[in-house]
Image: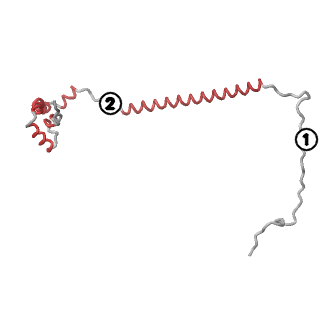
Amino acid sequence: MTRCEFAYDDGAYVLGALAPAERAAYERHLGGCASCREAVAEIAVLPGLLGRLDPAGLEQILPPPAPPRVPALLDEARQRRRRERSADRRRYALTTLAAAGLALLVGVGAAVALPRQVSPSGPPARRARRVRRCRWSPCDRWPPPGRCTPTSG
């Protein structure tokens, strides 16, 4: 069974939705294709039936339109992102707190566990540091000799 290239144009033809060139090509095709003629004959009554429908009556039959979902989806995405950020902040704070506590435990443990070196005679004596004193003497000239000075010209 071969498929007709115009197999899906029957509805558009019946409803008058084909462009003039497409309509002419489809009408030429209908002369030689029995399956397309049958398809058009089956749905040829649709435009008349659709014309009888009252738009006000459709409102009673059709369900009311759903409210737009995009704002609700955006709000949900924002709330989800806030929850994720809040969880990230808590996780970071707890990790930092745990690291600080571990550092404190290691420091206290090291201070308790390591032996102190205590000399039998008490704390080590401090060495006297020798301080060299300088005496400043006034200069007779400024700048000192041997330095370049700008010349006035």
Instruction: Give 21 or 82, whichever is nearer the viewer.
Output: 21
The answer to which image quadrant residue 33 occupies is top left
Badge number at residue 128: 1
Of all residues shown, which one is farthest toward the right?
121
Q: In the image, residue 17 lies at what x, y percent?
A: 16, 39
Dividing the image into 4 quarters, which one contains the C terminus? bottom right
Residue at image location 89% in from the left, 47% down from the top: 131
Q: Is residue 75 above or below residue 140?
A: above
Instruction: Give 27 or 142, whichever is nearer the viewer.
Output: 27
Badge number at residue 67: 2
Left or right of 27: which side holds 66? right
The answer to which image quadrant residue 20 occupies is top left
- Can I make out residue 48 in this image? no
Dividing the image into 4 quarters, which one contains the N terminus? top left
- Disc 1 is placed on an element classified as loop
Q: CA distance from mark 1 to mark 2?
A: 89 Å
Left or right of 33: which side holds 56? right
Residue at image location 75% in from the left, 74% down from the top: 152
Under mark 2, the amino acid is Pro
The answer to which image quadrant residue 26 occupies is top left
Q: How are the colours assigned in the image?
A: secondary structure
Instruction: Give 97 or 69, whichever is nearer the viewer.
Output: 97
Residue at image location 88% in from the left, 61% down from the top: 138
Under mark 1, the amino acid is Ala
Q: Is residue 132 above or below residue 8?
A: below
- Can I make out residue 33 in this image? yes
Badge number at residue 41: none
